Image (cartoon, rainbow, N blue to C red):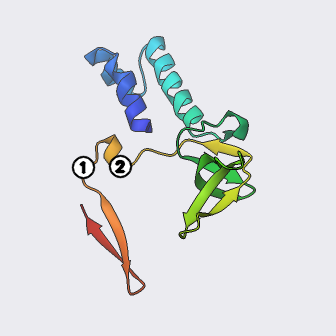
Amino acid sequence: MTDEKILEIARASLSPDEREDFDRGRGSRQIEQLRAFAENVVRELYQWLPIETAPKDKRILVRSGQEVYAAHWAKNITTDDEAWIVAEWGTEGDQALVKPTHWMSLPETPNAVGNSAGTALSCQSGVAQRSES
């Protein structure tokens, strides 16, 4: 969830007058507490957490040393081995595995937060080209 979305949700619970005070960063103690709560939630969302607490049912960011990867958890049905996979390629099922120490949620995509126009990069002849969708 983005900072803007959290603040939007917090604002929705206020009256029009309270919203104006909230937006200006002033107002009643309740509004100040609501703003502090929203800011604290944002900080918690973007904090590295111990890998033992990571969800194993979705793709997340993982940190191994100074490296950061998007990864997903997988279990080998033949050997019962489990690992964080950061890449898969080839027809033989080759995989790049990491042993991360920390994780955090992936940020939402622009389309998920209300941006209907997206930009994609494609590479042809070694030159990145931007296309609008």
Task: State how far apart marks 2 and 1 are (Cα).
Answer: 8 Å
Which amino acid lies under the numbered mark 2 shown in the image of this protein? Pro
Identify which residue, 93 or 4, lies in the foreground.
93
Which residue in the protein does label 2 denote?
A: 110
The residue positioned 31% from the left and 71% from the top of the image is 130
Precedes in sequence: disc 2 or disc 1: 2
Answer above or below: position of 61 versus 40: below
Relative image position of residue 96 (x, y in whole percent):
65, 62
The residue positioned 29% from the left and 42% from the top of the image is 114
Quadrant of the drawing holding the C terminus: bottom left
Which amino acid lies under the numbered mark 1 shown in the image of this protein? Ser
Relative image position of residue 24 (x, y in whole percent):
37, 29
Answer above or below: position of 87 versus 54: below
Quadrant of the drawing holding the N terminus: top left
The residue positioned 48% from the left and 45% from the top of the image is 107
Which residue in the protein does label 1 denote?
A: 116
Name the image quarter holding residue 3: top left
The residue positioned 56% from the left and 62% from the top of the image is 88
Answer above or below: position of 53 versus 85: above
Rendered image: mark on residue 36: none
